[in-house]
């Protein structure tokens, strides 16, 4: 049929080259100056081409443009005629031969070189190659000489709907919050169709839902998936499977289709309040449990998940609010009840708490549904425990005067067994804290007595530890620190703060301050020290010195005249009575030594000794005696030594001193030691000329007894 149509057209348009299908725009798009199409100067270019009128007017057109069309996937019994080449060259006597070259020439497209008919000899697939560029030429049949330049043209493969839509990214997953309103957008999907999107409807897709209704809907054109039911509840159903179809040909029957799946998961919103699993919880706890210990856990369940299920726990009421606290365990999503203050079975045996669990993350959209919280009652029973004794005070401070009598009571501690079966208690002193056994305690009544005298000036504090032990159970022990402070009693007299040595200038003026002294007292009176100074009663009218009390509790000693002379009196002793302000007051006499000295004109002491005139080195009598004794001792030693020496040297004197020395020096034998000593011959000694008149024997013996090396 197309072949016949072509022949018809051919007849009509002879001698033009005709192409099967021409699109109206092509008329305008193929102006004459497109040389690749129209090959200017070629005989193929008709004279009429220059006239625009012709181009616009199809019926009068003299030339064709360079496109042919062929349907893809054509599978008839014979090759499909694509088009026909023709030239209006005057062949004259010559026979024309058409030649085809370019994309697929000879393999896909075959030309009848006589008629110019082009056939597609293979099945074409637009999706594989949409167009072929070929070149046609008319040559002389015999000489093969080109009768005109080659002419290029295109064969376009025309689309048919041979590709189904495909979801390349499927299967899909999407989420949407539960309780969303109707029409909430969930996601969108896209299918692709390999067919020509600009030609026909082969690639025009329409989407629909095959499965997943009535929960979800899809917009046919945009493939946007929306919720189709309001208030879908995650706690009822969490996951939905949606099957989506894309159909081409605009969804009309006969179109091709593809499907994909979309899994929609509802995400949680806080639409459920917490709910306690039990309305009443029972816990029991021993009274001596350590503070902070977990006593029990309460849990409010929440159908939501994640943070929407999170609750914070609180104690909102009850008689144990001060003693217990509840903390929220975000991990386990429960509340832990802990002890905050000590329990006492003997005081209160049970407590009731009202606990509340409240969602932490409230969604205002659902807060109208009621409170997102729940309450439960917790009953806590306190169990009795055997407890150690309890002192009446955590510490004791006792005060005692240092002159307190031995065995006098200085204080008392008390303790009791808090248990119902109250055991009697015995007291003792931890002797590690009272190593000197300064105190005793009455084991029954806890009265502390003084065992040895106290001295505040030795130790102000005696910090001891008292132990209380239950008689019925010796392992129940408590300890308490007792600080005993020793209070001051005026038991020390004041005295000079240091050993003063005063100097007085011979040429000093009357009324001059010779020395200022201060006093000290080991006692520690409450209001500080106040000292009174006085001269001995018999010295009150001392013609030489007077005293003056200063503001700062010190005392100045003043010279009364200027008639002091160290030749006359070198040293004055001035006893001063110092008295404290205790009750009764204590006093002592300290004596100040005042030396008379020679001073320079400006009052600088230069010499204070009378002896200076006699013995310039100023030795004391004691030192002189000692030196004298030494000299005598030395003399005695010298005399003794000389006497002894004389006696011992007697034999040596027999020979000339010099000789002996000479002999000894020359002697070079080694000493014989002990053996030689034995050989000492006194007879020879006494008579050096003896039997042999032989001296060396003796000398040898003498040397042998001495260190020979020293020689
Ligand atoms: C004894 O205890 C008292 C009062 O706690 C304290 O001031 C003092 O420093 C303590 N003395 C000693 C030696 O520990
Ligand atoms: C006062 O000094 C003189 C000598 O200067 C002395 O003889 C006299 O005993 C002194 N009087 C007293 C009370 O020390």
Image: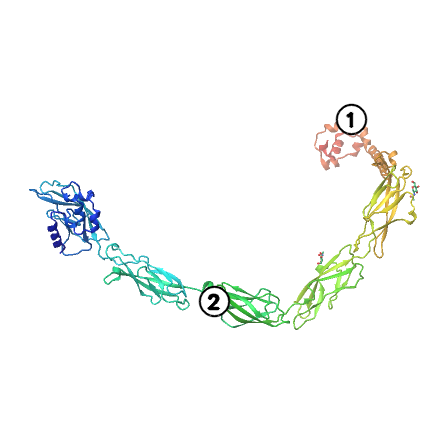
Q: Which residue is outermost to the left?
A: 93
**Helix, strand, or loop for circle 1?**
helix
174 vs 380, nearest the viewer:
174
Q: Look at the numbered disc 1 and say if its residue's Cβ is closer than 8 Å to ligand 2.
A: no
Q: Image point 22% across, 55% down: which residue?
A: 159
Residue at image mark 1: 658
The Cα atoms of the two marked residues, 1 and 2, are separated by: 137 Å
622 vs 247, nearest the viewer:
247
Q: Horizontal and vertical percent for residue 297?
A: 53, 68
Q: Horizontal and vertical percent for residue 322?
A: 60, 67
Report the side of 3 relative to 502 (left or right): left
- The answer to whether the residue labelled 1 contacts the one labelled 2, judged by CB atoms less than 8 Å apart, is no
Which numbered disc, 1 or 2, marks the residue closer to the eye? 2
Crowding at dot 2, Cα within 10 Å, few <14 / some 14-19 / many 20+, comes out as: some
Q: Horizontal and vertical percent for residue 424?
A: 70, 71
Residue at image mark 2: 367
Q: Look at the numbered disc 2 and say if its residue's Cβ is closer than 8 Å to ligand 1.
A: no
Crowding at dot 1, Cα within 10 Å, few <14 / some 14-19 / many 20+, comes out as: few
Report the side of 418 relative to 130 (left or right): right
Q: Quadrant of ligand 1?
A: bottom right
- Is any part of residue 534 visible from this angle? yes
Q: Horizontal and vertical percent for residue 434?
A: 73, 59
Image vertical order of residue 569 relative to residue 64, above or below? above
**Helix, strand, or loop for circle 2?**
helix
């Amino acid at each position: 049929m197309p072949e016949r149509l072509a022949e018809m057209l051919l007849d009509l348009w002879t001698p033009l080259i005709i192409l099967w299908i021409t699109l109206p725009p092509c008329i305008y798009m193929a102006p004459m100056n497109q040389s690749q199409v129209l090959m200017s100067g070629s005989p193929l270019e008709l004279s009429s081409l220059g006239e625009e009128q012709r181009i616009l007017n199809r019926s009068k057109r003299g030339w064709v443009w360079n496109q042919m069309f062929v349907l893809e996937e054509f599978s008839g019994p014979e090759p499909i005629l694509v088009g026909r080449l023709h030239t209006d060259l005057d062949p004259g006597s010559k026979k024309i031969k058409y030649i085809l070259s370019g994309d697929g020439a000879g393999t896909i497209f075959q030309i009848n070189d006589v008629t110019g008919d082009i056939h597609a000899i293979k099945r074409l697939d637009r999706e594989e190659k949409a167009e072929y560029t070929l070149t046609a030429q008319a040559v002389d049949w015999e000489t093969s000489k080109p009768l005109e330049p080659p002419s290029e043209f295109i064969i376009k493969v025309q689309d048919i709907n041979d590709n189904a839509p495909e979801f390349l990214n499927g299967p899909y997953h999407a989420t949407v919050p539960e309780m969303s309103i109707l029409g909430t957008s969930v996601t969108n999907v896209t299918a692709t169709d390999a067919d020509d999107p600009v030609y026909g409807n082969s690639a025009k897709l329409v989407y629909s839902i095959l499965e997943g209704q009535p929960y979800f809907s899809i917009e046919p054109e945009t493939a946007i998936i929306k919720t189709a039911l309001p208030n879908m509840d995650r706690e009822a159903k969490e996951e939905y499977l949606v099957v989506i179809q894309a159909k081409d040909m605009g969804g009309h029957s006969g179109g091709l289709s593809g499907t994909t799946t979309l899994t929609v998961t509802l995400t949680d919103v806080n639409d459920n309040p917490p709910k306690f699993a039990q309305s009443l919880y029972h816990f029991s706890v021993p009274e001596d449990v350590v503070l902070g210990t977990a006593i029990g856990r309460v849990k409010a369940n929440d159908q939501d998940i994640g943070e929407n299920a999170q609750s914070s726990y609180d104690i909102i009421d009850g008689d144990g609010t001060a003693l217990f606290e509840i903390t929220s365990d975000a991990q386990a999503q429960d509340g832990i009840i802990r002890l905050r203050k000590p329990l006492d079975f003997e005081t209160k045996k049970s407590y009731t708490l009202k606990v509340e669990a409240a969602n932490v993350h409230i969604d205002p959209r659902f807060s109208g549904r009621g409170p997102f919280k729940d309450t439960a009652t917790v009953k806590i029973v306190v169990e009795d425990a055997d407890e150690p004794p309890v002192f009446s005070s955590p510490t004791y401070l006792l005060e005692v005067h240092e002159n307190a009598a031995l065995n006098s009571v200085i204080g008392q501690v008390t303790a009791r067994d808090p248990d119902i079966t109250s055991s009697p208690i015995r007291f003792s002193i931890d002797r590690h804290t009272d190593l000197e056994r300064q105190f005793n305690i009455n084991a029954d009544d806890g009265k502390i007595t003084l065992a040895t005298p106290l001295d505040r000036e030795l130790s102000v504090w005696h910090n001891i530890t008292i132990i209380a032990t239950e008689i019925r159970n010796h392992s129940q022990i408590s300890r308490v620190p007792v600080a005993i402070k020793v209070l001051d009693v005026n038991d020390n007299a004041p005295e000079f703060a240091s050993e003063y040595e005063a100097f007085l200038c011979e040429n000093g003026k009357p009324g001059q301050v010779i020395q200022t002294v201060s006093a000290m007292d080991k006692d520690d009176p409450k209001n500080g020290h106040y000292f009174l100074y006085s001269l001995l009663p018999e010295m009150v009218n001392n013609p030489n010195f007077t005293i003056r009390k200063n503001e700062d509790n010190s005392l100045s000693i003043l010279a009364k005249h200027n008639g002091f002379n160290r030749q006359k009196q070198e040293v004055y002793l001035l006893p001063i009575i110092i008295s404290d302000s205790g009750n009764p007051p204590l006093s002592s006499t300290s004596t100040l030594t005042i030396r008379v000295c020679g001073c320079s004109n400006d009052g600088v002491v230069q010499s204070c000794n009378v002896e200076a005139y006699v013995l310039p080195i100023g030795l004391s009598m004691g030192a002189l005696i000692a030196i004298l004794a030494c000299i005598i001792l030395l003399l005695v030693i010298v005399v003794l030594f000389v006497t002894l020496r004389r006696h011992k040297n007697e034999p040596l004197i027999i020979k000339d001193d010099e000789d002996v020395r000479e002999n000894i020096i020359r002697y070079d034998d080694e000493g014989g030691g002990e053996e030689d000593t034995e050989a000492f011959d006194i007879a020879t000694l006494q008579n050096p000329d003896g039997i042999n008149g032989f001296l060396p024997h003796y000398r040898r013996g003498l040397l042998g007894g001495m260190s020979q090396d020293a020689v």
